[in-house]
Amino acid sequence: MHASKGDRLVVHGRVVGQQDQVVEIVEVLGPNGNPPYRVRAENGHETIMSPGPDSVIDHRKASEQF
């Protein structure tokens, strides 16, 4: 998994009815775009994540519309 600052990290819901979580990658802490990542949620909360197999990187920048 490789990401850049500004990419979006999508964590898929693990049970039926649970929504996906989408956060913006604000800093890549690992070498060559690898995890861990400092991420920011829509509500402004920041944390450090090492995404699991239920996660994907959306390389569209957070500022781009769907």
Image (spheres, rainbow, N blue to C red):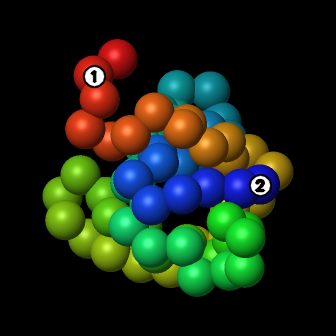
The image position of residue 3, as x and y in percent, is: 61, 55
Label 2: which secondary element: loop
As drawn, the residue found furthest toward the left would be 43
Residue at image x 35%, y 17%?
Answer: 66
Residue at image x 53%, y 49%?
Answer: 9
The image position of residue 17, as x and y in percent, is: 52, 26
Q: Is residue 8 positioned above or below 31 on the image?
A: above
Which disc is residue 17 wearing? none
Which comes before the other along the chain, label 2 or label 1? 2
Q: Are marks 2 and 1 in contact (CB under 8 Å)?
A: no
The residue at which mark 1 appears reads as 65
- Does residue 54 appear to the left or right of 19 in the view shown? right
As drawn, the residue found furthest toward the top would be 66
Q: Is residue 59 positioned above or below 66 on the image?
A: below
Q: Nearer the viewer, residue 54 or 1?
A: 1
Q: Is residue 42 positioned above or below 26 on the image?
A: above
Query: What amino acid does circle 1 point to?
Result: Gln
Label 1: which secondary element: loop
Which disc is residue 1 wearing? 2
